[in-house]
């Protein structure tokens, strides 16, 4: 018996020294997640084992009783340290505020108050000495001791529940680390069962709890336990703006950060299969299925409900290169895609800029050339004035086309008359023998230069595309109450037989011709840059028209005129109109 107790005492001394050394080392690494809690736990266990060892070696003396009481100086921090470590490991360290520390301090304060100032027998009732007891005294536990025992086992029970629950939901990714923690938590329960139900001369709880401390130390220092625990996970991954999911080899989500849970709209996504968790995000699920583990990292971009996501699937391997899970990273790149699209649109506008200038400046140049030729032929000063007007128009066009290339909205709005705009634009275009008819008039509030640009492009389109296939206009036989303008003195080889009509409507106006028209299936495409039915055309005329209309907040539509030609319907204007009195041609 004496030999067994001596061996037991020296074992406790050795373990106490080892635990004390590990406690100091853990304290030097207290900046690591869980390091402080582990240091406190190991220090408490070291004091516990040291007091128990000295009490056994001095059994039967008053000193043995002193150490029998003194071991609680180690028991208290050991129990609290184990509880705090469990919270830290399972990612619940957010509960470790000052209130939690205050609550953990209540029981030790009550216990030590009873120890120093309480009545005899509150903790122990001492009788003896005797050879049967481990400390050489007959020690009968009192009510404070039983209260302390219940409290200590409550902390161990909560710690065990937290760790076991975490083990069940962690899947295979943390298997080795979790096994070490489960072993550490089982040891004190085993020691308690042996101490309560076994008839032994020594107490196994200090040694087995020392085993708990040693196991956790190995996991912390050697097994890098907390390197991939929720502590590190939350400190690193929760700071990301990306959704992060850790998936085990069974395609079960074992970790998800706040961004990931918000993306799925599911706070309970952890523990679910990928199929169930991504059920509301079918494209994301489809991409997950398509990614594979053959490459070091797989990446793709998906679009879902007008949002863009960059998704990556990275396999996780253990030290033996065995696949233990995957990291599924989803980063929203909607703003980036929008910037790319805007940049692409701007680049396209710049590419079209030169063509737009060439397109819109062609007619004023033709008019200026024609007028200059007539001026030389007739020596007519008025023709030089018209050449000057054409040059002024070109300067204005350059400014307007620059604004179009920058996608600027119109700001210069004035009151204009529909008939005056149509006639002014008609004089800027080489219309040949084409005819302009104006039915009705109305007030228009808008930018004069841009609206002139609109009319010029429509008139030029009608002249160029309608001259080879014009048909008699339904109203050509009668000129009742309409403005009619010809251009017999301009370059006469274009626009033969083309009649262009401008009609006022309650909410806008129309511009139509008697040309070949636009097939129904092509009417939406004619407003697209580059779309043209002419080999020499640039496909910019009606695109510019649409831009001008939209910059004024109006609507435009291509339909069919009464004679089967093309008809542009511009609507959305204020409902102010007047009937034009007959104007001589």
Image (cartoon, rainbow, N blue to C red):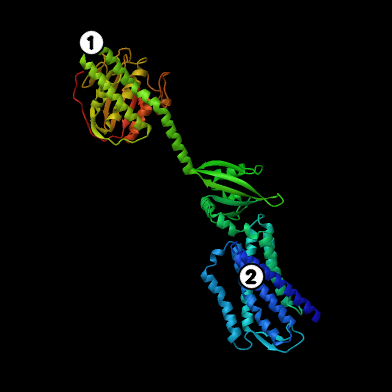
Residue in the foreground of this view, choosing between 131 and 555: 131
Q: Is residue 223 above or below residue 423?
A: below
Quarter of image, res 254: bottom right
**Residue at the image point whose x is 33% and y is 31% from the top:** 548
The answer to whether one can see residue 431 in this image is: no
Q: Residues within 10 Å of mark 2 (few under 14, many from 20)?
A: many
Quarter of image, res 69: bottom right
Residue located beneath label 1 in the image:
378
Residue in the foreground of this view, choosing between 491 and 37: 37
Residue in the foreground of this view, choosing between 220 and 503: 220
The answer to whether one can see residue 416 in this image is: yes
User: Upstream in the sequence, badge 2 or badge 1?
Assistant: 2
**Residue at the image point whose x is 67% and y is 84% from the top:** 66
Q: Is residue 233 above or below residue 359?
A: below
Quarter of image, res 383: top left
| Mark 2 residue element | helix
Q: Is residue 573 above or below residue 190?
A: above
Residue 506 lies, in percent from the top left, at: 26, 32
Residue 163 lies, in percent from the top left, at: 64, 64
Residue located beneath label 2 in the image:
41
Q: Is residue 22 left or right of residue 400?
A: right
Q: Is residue 341 left or right of residue 582?
A: right
Q: Which quarter of the rendering shows the N terminus?
A: bottom right
**Residue at the image point whose x is 21% and y is 13% from the top:** 380
Residues at marks 2 and 1, CA–CA distance in whole angstroms: 111 Å
């Amino acid at each position: 018996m004496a030999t067994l107790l001596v061996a037991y005492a020296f074992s406790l001394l050795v373990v106490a020294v080892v635990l004390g050394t590990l406690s100091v080392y853990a304290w030097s690494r207290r900046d690591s997640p869980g390091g402080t809690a582990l240091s406190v736990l190991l220090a408490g266990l070291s004091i516990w084992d040291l007091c128990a060892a000295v009490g056994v070696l001095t059994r039967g003396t008053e000193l043995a009783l002193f150490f029998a009481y003194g071991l609680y100086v180690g028991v208290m921090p050991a129990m609290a340290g184990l509880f705090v470590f469990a919270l830290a490991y399972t990612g619940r360290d957010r509960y470790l505020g000052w209130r939690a520390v205050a609550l953990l301090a209540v029981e030790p304060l009550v216990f030590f108050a009873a120890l120093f100032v309480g009545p005899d027998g509150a903790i122990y009732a001492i009788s003896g000495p005797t050879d049967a007891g481990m400390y050489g005294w007959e020690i009968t536990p009192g009510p404070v001791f039983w209260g302390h025992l219940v409290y200590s086992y409550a902390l161990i029970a909560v710690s065990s529940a937290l760790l076991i629950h975490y083990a069940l939901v962690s899947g295979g990714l943390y298997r080795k680390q979790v096994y070490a923690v489960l072993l550490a938590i089982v040891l004190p329960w085993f020691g308690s069962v042996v101490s309560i139900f076994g008839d032994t001369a020594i107490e196994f709880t200090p040694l087995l709890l020392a085993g708990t401390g040693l196991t956790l130390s190995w996991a912390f220092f050697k097994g890098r336990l907390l390197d991939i625990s929720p502590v590190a996970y939350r400190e690193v991954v929760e700071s990301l703006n990306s959704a992060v999911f850790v998936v085990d080899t069974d395609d079960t989500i074992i970790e998800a950060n706040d961004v990931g849970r918000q993306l799925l709209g599911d706070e309970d996504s952890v523990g679910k299969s990928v199929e169930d968790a991504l059920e509301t995000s079918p494209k994301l699920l489809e991409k997950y299925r398509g990614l594979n583990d053959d490459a070091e990292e797989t990446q793709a971009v998906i679009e879902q409900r007008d949002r863009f996501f960059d998704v990556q699937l990275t396999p996780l391997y253990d030290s033996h290169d065995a696949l233990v899970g995957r990291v599924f990273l989803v980063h929203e790149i909607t703003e980036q895609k929008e910037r790319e699209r805007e940049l692409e649109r701007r680049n396209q506008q710049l590419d079209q800029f030169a063509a737009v200038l060439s397109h819109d400046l062609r007619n004023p140049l033709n008019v200026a050339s024609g007028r200059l030729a007539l001026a030389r032929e007739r020596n007519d000063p008025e023709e030089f004035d018209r050449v000057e007007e054409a040059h002024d128009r070109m300067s204005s066009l350059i400014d307007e086309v620059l604004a179009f290339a920058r996608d600027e909205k119109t700001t210069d709005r004035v009151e204009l008359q529909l008939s005056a705009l149509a006639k002014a634009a008609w004089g800027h275009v080489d219309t040949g023998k084409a005819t302009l008819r104006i039915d009705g008039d109305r007030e228009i509030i808008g930018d004069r230069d841009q609206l002139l640009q609109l009319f010029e492009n429509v008139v030029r389109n009608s002249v160029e595309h309608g001259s080879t296939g014009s048909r008699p206009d339904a109203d050509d036989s009668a000129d009742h109450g309409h403005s009619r303008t010809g251009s017999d003195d301009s370059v006469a080889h274009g626009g033969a037989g083309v009649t262009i009509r401008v009609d006022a409507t309650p909410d806008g106006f129309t511009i139509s011709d008697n040309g070949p028209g636009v097939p129904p299936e092509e009417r939406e495409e004619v407003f697209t840059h580059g779309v043209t039915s002419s080999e020499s055309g640039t496909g910019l005329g009606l695109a510019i028209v649409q831009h001008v209309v939209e910059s004024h907040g109006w609507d435009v539509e291509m339909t069919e005129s009464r004679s089967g030609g093309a008809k542009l319907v511009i609507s959305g204007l204020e409902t102010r109109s007047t009937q034009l009195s007959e104007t001589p041609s």
